Amino acid sequence: MTVPAPARPRVNPWVLSAFWFGSAFHWLVLLLILMPQNVVTFVGTTHKGTFLGLLTGIGAVLALVLPPLVGAHSDRTGKRLLYLREGLIVNLAGVAVMALAVATLGGMTGFWVYVLGFLLVQFGNNFATAPYSALIPELVRPEQRGRYSGVMAMLQALGQLLGAVSAFAVGALHLPPLVLFALIAGFLVVPAIVTLRGVPDTVIARDLHAPTLSWRALFAHQPFLWVFVTRVLFSLGQYSVQPFLQYYNKDVLRQADPETSTSVMLLCIIVGSIVSASVGGRVSDRVGRKPVIYVAGSVMAAAALLLLIAPGFGPALALAAAFGLGFGAFTSVDWALGSDAMPSQSSYARDMGIWHVAFVAPQMSSAPQGALLDWGNAQGGNLGYTLVFGIAALCFMLGVVLIRNVPERRPQVSAA
């Protein structure tokens, strides 16, 4: 007997992805501005890369384990946004603990309290977003996923843009770091309310006869396997560079105010990503996902290598904008490609949670990458930056080469 396709309620793409806007603001300010700055305050400059990598890696453990488990539970209950509400509360509590450590503690005691707060942040955010990640494949028809993925990428880029502008303003006005922690909380809550009010948290109609695949069967499904592998590679490239941008601005570009310089560089990356994200998803609905990724990954690899020989801050900003163009195009297509690869309607949240592991597992490389950065720089000539930026370029190019193995299925326009 043929089972009819499940009904998909119409949801505004901007409302559906609103929480990604707040989450993007949250992670940009936390990972790229506050954490590098706060780690130096706690442990000094000699081992800053090692301790920043350790902090990022510890948090990544939760982000690695939690999404598939929470996603599977969400699939059993049929609920999605309930988890967003509960996770948001824990996320906010973690931000408060981190702010408390910065404001009242110092040294290694402050650092370990800061780690505890970051673990709460990771737990809460991943608890919230694992089921939330299922909404695009669940609610959006395949022929529209590029558009919805593009909107999601634009909202994430706009959240990052606002985060970079906020960090720049706080630095320029010499405001205390606690202001940024307060802004993180505010920009998590408001977009969450938009999504919670605009998307009904009812049990979504699904094909209950669709099988739930074992993990082994899921990775035996070729579209999912290769989308997972290539996403790991692109994330490895990202986390080879992203955590250390502030240190790069100080050590390589010799910027007197590396926090502000990093904010300006992030602005260039984000503006570039907004430009390409606005068109990348729609283009992929017409020509396919992979051609967009071929171009995007090549641009990112070239920019990562050229940053090593940038003659000054101005050329580095131009390269940052070029990197942003590639990154925005990639993110506008990435979610659509992942959604297309999901093999079963009965386990969208669990399978998207497993796919989410490809985003966060590479964060665990930040600890060895940070140690590699410190070791290389100790040899002289900024060797550490050559190593980690070179690893980033290699990962991007491997992702471009291996994405060819994804047996892409062109979405067919449906009248439903």
Image (cartoon, rainbow, N blue to C red):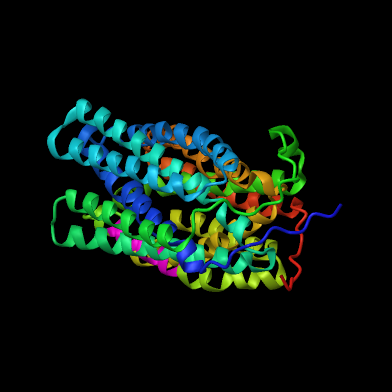
Name the quadrant containing residue 159.
bottom left
Residue 316 spot, x, y in % from top left: 39, 62
Residue 163 spot, x, y in % from top left: 32, 59
The residue positioned farthest toward the right in the image shown: 1
Residue 83 spot, x, y in % from top left: 45, 44
User: Which of 33 and 86 lies nearest the eye of the viewer?
Assistant: 86
- Report the label total: 0
Tell me where the magenta segment starts and ends, as one range: 261-273
In this picture, residue 211 sits left or right of residue 98 = right
Residue at x 28% of width, y 52% of height = 184
Residue at x 59% of width, y 42% of height = 75
Name the quadrant containing residue 337.
bottom right
User: From what the image shows, is residue 244 above or below residue 215?
Assistant: below
The residue positioned farthest toward the top in the image shown: 109
Question: Magenta stretch: residue 176 in it?
Answer: no
User: Which of 111 and 20 lies nearest the eye of the viewer?
Assistant: 20
Residue at x 71% of width, y 51% of height = 207
Can residue 142 be seen here? The reply is: yes
In this picture, residue 359 sits left or right of residue 84 = right
Residue 38 spot, x, y in % from top left: 24, 41
* Main SS, magenta residues: helix
Question: Magenta stretch: residue 266 in it?
Answer: yes
User: Which of 162 and 206 lies nearest the eye of the viewer?
Assistant: 206
Residue at x 58% of width, y 58% of height = 136
User: Which of 94 and 9 lies nearest the eye of the viewer?
Assistant: 9
Where the C terminus falls, by quadrant?
A: bottom right
Can residue 324 be seen here? The reply is: no
